[in-house]
Image (tube, helix red, strand yellow):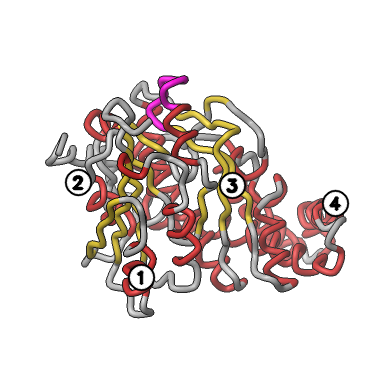
Amino acid sequence: MRNASVPFVTVVVPCRNEARHLERSLGALTDQDYPADRMEIIVVDGLSDDGSPDIARRILSNAPQSWDLVQNPERITPTAWNVGIERSRGDVIIVVIAHAELAHDYVRQAVAALEETGADCVGGSIRTVGDDTGLGTGIALALSSIFGVGGSTFRTRIGHSGAVDTVPFGAYRRDAFERFGLLDPEFVRNQDTEINFRITTNGGRIWMDRRLTSVYHPRSSLAALWRQHFRTGESKVQLFRKYGSLPALRHYIPGAFVVAVLGSLVAAVAAREPLVALIVLGPYAGALVACTTWIARRHLASWAWVFVALVTLHFSYGLGFLAGVGKYLRPGRQRVVARPPTPRNARR
């Protein structure tokens, strides 16, 4: 395969203070079974202060692929994507976060899937692996369950292939960015969902392929999990403001759930009847206990952590969604549909 007919692939790694996971993430990239002379790795560092750039240099200095380490002074992920894309030479551009590890055949299988499906972007399933604690296991199990994350195909349907609304760690054709634009820097969170939604709403196609697998290391504390999913809920309203809709019904459910909970509590206070609150909280509590037991059936020592992680996911996302309604849909704020600029270097 070592010839110019093999597509050249660029892997872009946005990074900020990822010293804990960066060595494994970059090690997985340097170990790819794709021809090394047809691949480059670009780490885009957001001014890390934990030694991440030094770790990247140490790992990549022995890499068989060409590589580059560049700075992202704005320190936000969409800018990191854009910096990496503009510096890239690839016919195919893959973006992977620094706390994930791609399978050793990911690049090769991604190129094959693009060629076979004609899709603009392909990706695969992720296996969520927490740290070696009860809490870490609980968070990982919650994030891998339908009750925890809804119908998020890439998290809950390992082994699935088919058209989807989004994928993690997507492999994009270069001309997808030329036709649909670069990342919108307004989306500090959920930038991959936004670019993928822009692609599909403009006639493009996102494909999930069962051959593409990766490992994802989630936030390791409940506070960090809460912050992440609160901001994710907010960003979904930001996405709605831009496009007037969301990629899937599942994105509305946490916000509707929290509204129902708050409504039942207000009704209970107004009626001076505490049992009214159980109209919503009663069925939720029953479903929560039942689903926690099923999810943790092979990890019973982590049952309580799964329970708490599920509650954290549901309420952080839902409250974040409501906060986003107040932030992005308040009266007088106009919905602006903007197309981010296309790459300056369409082909280097």
- What is the quadrant of residue 201 in the picture? top left
Q: Nearer the viewer, mark 1 or mark 3?
A: 1
The answer to whether the residue labelled 3 contacts the one labelled 2, judged by CB atoms less than 8 Å apart, is no
Residue at 26% over, 35% down? 177
Vertical arrangement, residue 4 with respect to residue 342, above or below: above
Answer few, some or many: residues within 10 Å of disc 1's Cα (few below 14, many 20 plus, some between 14 and 19).
few
Residues at marks 2 and 1, CA–CA distance in whole angstroms: 24 Å
Look at the image and say whether residue 115 sits in the magenta stretch.
Answer: yes
Q: Which residue is mark 4?
A: 294
The answer to whether the residue labelled 4 contacts the one labelled 2, judged by CB atoms less than 8 Å apart, is no
Q: Give the secondary structure at mark 4.
A: helix
Q: Which residue is mark 2?
A: 86
Q: Nearer the viewer, mark 4 or mark 2?
A: 2
Figure quadrant of the C terminus: top left
- Residue type beneath disc 3: Ile
Residue at 40% over, 35% down? 197
Considering every residue shown, the one lying at the far front of the view is 2
Q: Is residue 100 left or right of residue 68?
A: right
Q: Nearer the viewer, mark 2 or mark 1?
A: 1
- Residue type beneath disc 2: Glu
Residues at marks 3 and 4, CA–CA distance in whole angstroms: 20 Å
Residue at 46% over, 34% down? 110
Front residue of 111 and 164: 111
Residues at marks 1 and 3, CA–CA distance in whole angstroms: 27 Å
Vertical arrangement, residue 49 with respect to residue 23, above or below: below
In the image, the segment drawn in magenta is 114-121
